[in-house]
Image (cartoon, coloured by chain):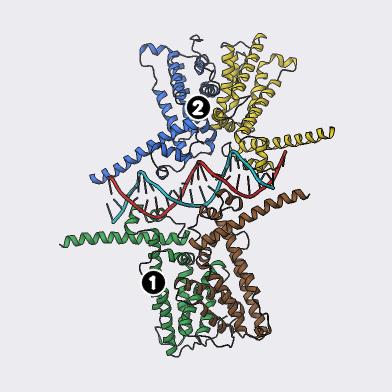
Chain colours: A yellow, B blue, C brown, D green, E cyan, F red
Amino acid sequence: MIVGVIVKTKHQLKAEQTIKKLKKAAYELFIEKGFSHTSIDDIVKKAGFTKGAFYIHFKSKEEIFTMIMNERMLIQQTDLRTIEPNSIEQHFDIRKIIEQKVEYMLKATESEHWTPMFLEFVANCHRLPQEQNNPTLLYEEWRKEVEKHLLNLKQKGLIDPVLPLDLLATTIIAIFDGFNIQSHIDHSINPKRQLDVILFLIGSRTKPSV
Amino acid sequence: MIVGVIVKTKHQLKAEQTIKKLKKAAYELFIEKGFSHTSIDDIVKKAGFTKGAFYIHFKSKEEIFTMIMNERMLIQQTDLRTIEPNSIEQHFDIRKIIEQKVEYMLKATESEHWTPMFLEFVANCHRLPQEQNNPTLLYEEWRKEVEKHLLNLKQKGLIDPVLPLDLLATTIIAIFDGFNIQSHIDHSINPKRQLDVILFLIGSRTKPSV
Amino acid sequence: MIVGVIVKTKHQLKAEQTIKKLKKAAYELFIEKGFSHTSIDDIVKKAGFTKGAFYIHFKSKEEIFTMIMNERMLIQQTDLRTIEPNSIEQHFDIRKIIEQKVEYMLKATESEHWTPMFLEFVANCHRLPQEQNNPTLLYEEWRKEVEKHLLNLKQKGLIDPVLPLDLLATTIIAIFDGFNIQSHIDHSINPKRQLDVILFLIGSRTKPSV
Amino acid sequence: MIVGVIVKTKHQLKAEQTIKKLKKAAYELFIEKGFSHTSIDDIVKKAGFTKGAFYIHFKSKEEIFTMIMNERMLIQQTDLRTIEPNSIEQHFDIRKIIEQKVEYMLKATESEHWTPMFLEFVANCHRLPQEQNNPTLLYEEWRKEVEKHLLNLKQKGLIDPVLPLDLLATTIIAIFDGFNIQSHIDHSINPKRQLDVILFLIGSRTKPSV
DNA sequence: AATGAATGAGCGTTCATTCAT
DNA sequence: AATGAATGAACGCTCATTCAT
């Protein structure tokens, strides 16, 4: 029955809309007040629903947190992948492409005050429900992605790293997270400077800018 | 008047003992369950007191958290400073001294499951009371200390860094924090490998071990 | 949609029932133990609910106190207004109608041990939340009501007051409150005697009864 | 032994000083925050002592409240008694002397924000410890005093009251308390207008001022 | 006489979660 | 799918009072 299907789809669409709105509200509140200082009431009020609606779509406050974080991290990874040299000129400027990627990540992090929420997530992730797509897997994928990328650049002769590529991948991500922590605590720290470190580590022969 | 002094001291001693016990209990619980999942009741029960006693010595849960974290971080900094070459042989083995320092930090971090508590602290530090000795100052001091140390080694001709020393100091700390995050999320990550990265960055000519 | 309306109404009815029960319990406890000696726990236990239910319907203990007091005072004012001469005989017996009004108020005050709660309310009213219908307005209305009533009686030639009517209204209410205080402190004081004072003040020529 | 006596007296003097300071601090805080919102800690901190000192001199918070209130009310009564015609001119101006007495009371009441504390006292007095000098006796004495005074004036032919003197005394005090309540709630009420009412009640032939 | 650490019961309030509607 | 009243356990914190010093 087509009518039935349409009705069902309408319901589904409505549900998806609700889920989306709840996630948006939760994300903004977690950013603003932190996860543990945000209540379900805060979330549903901001999203324009009531508590019951929340529990239809999510098992717990922890679940929506995990979902939001995994999705965001996935988006970041995907976005990062799309930053590719798309013209002949860029092909040979390894510096520029690394810079673009780092700057994308910094923008995503800074502009949304992502750091405290991310740290709260990492601090609690061993207590959070993680049926799938858990942070362990996400980080592993991330590292593999970076490593693959480095291998690609190395094979093209664009970089000449001294350290093993897997260690390099881990280190690059560590530097990124570590600079985030420091610039979150001390606003005088300029996270853009990590670019020079990374370029040095991968053996790009471009001169440091500062 | 001796009598007066003794009375005062006895009260003080008792108070100090209580504060110490409360801090110890709080520290262990923050490690075990995290700050936000630990209640004052948990703390005082573990320490063998009642709630009232807690509020004689601390203004709030946040205050004891800040105090504990600042003290621990200060201790770590002090301990780190004491790891010095104490024989002629070590004098020339820069690798060994860096290794000792990194390993001390790793031990302090791992053996006590420090990372989640530390991340929760950083995630919330902008909402925490920090009259003095706040994390901004602690991190700044830490960076200056590392930078001073690097300068010392450089002047002795033991290291030959390419990057500016202040950036190097920031980076070394970032790598440490970043490896902590990763090995906290993914236990297959071996944080000792950061040693090779650091040695490479500072321009020690010793070969990487792995 | 009838179904929607019914659902909404059922929820509303339940809520109204709960609010009513909570207010009743609170009122009785404030009478019995005083406002500051009554806890939310006392109230909800007496009403047969849990604390959470209380905070769904009231913002704070102060709010329910303010609401209860304002409602009661409003009821008293309304009741008082309904005491009117309803037969030809009463029309000319000004004494009787004043007596009825005073006695209604005395009964409302005495039989419910209203005085201590009322005094606690007045003592704290400058610290209480009073978005609307606050005691200032209630007293003002009350005075105006009494004044209007006196004017009516004067125009009918039933009373012949020497003092200005606004001062008289204020004074009558003051006497009522003042006698309440005294008879609350000293049970040998008979508040009914205020009737003679009032009759004298308004210039009714009936002889005092005592 | 004279020395012993001196030592004892010194202790006593010190104790009296402490009691005085504690009462002063308590009085000011009860005025400022109300009795139930003032803690022993507040009192001893303001007086410059510690909790222990409080419990040496007072049994409970209620006790110091009762003591303070009884003392104040006694002082007011005594002060009131001292306002007497002291020259021939005043002897015949009954209006002036009543005015002085009422104004003294109004000043004592208004200038110290006495009303809320007084009402809180009356509201709770049946729950307060009142070994002696309790408010019942104080009010009774007060009424007798006023009555005696009225009798004196009447015998001198200065006043010509219609109502019985005991009722008049009760009424005058009731008017005073009642005006206090009203002007506490509604600052637009001018308590000085009670003077005209009292003068009218006692049968002074001076014209009302307003 | 005074200190001040400690008690312990209690308080107002919050909140994740449930469920009848 | 969504409502929202209700639960019930906790929570951070206060405070009158006690007592060893």
Report the side of A88 relative to A95 (left or right).
right
In the rendered view, would you say F6 is above or below B130? below
Are tags 2 and 1 found on a single chain? no
The amino acid beneath tag 2 is Thr
- Residue C186, quarter of picture: bottom left
Any mark on residue D74, and which?
A: 1
Identify the residue under disc 2: B115
Residue A199 position in % (x across, y down):
61, 17
Report the side of D108 relative to C161 (left or right).
left
The residue at the point 59 percent across, 78 percent down is C100
Residue D21 position in % (x across, y down):
36, 60
The amino acid beneath tag 1 is Leu
Graded by Cα atoms within 10 Å as few (under 14), some (14 to 19) or many (20 or more), the crowding at tag 1 reads some
Question: Closer to the camera, C148 or D200?
Answer: C148
The residue at the point 26 percent across, 43 percent down is B6
Rounded to the nearest angstrom, the CA distance separating label 2 from label 1 is 67 Å
Q: Residue C73: tell me if it is visible.
A: yes
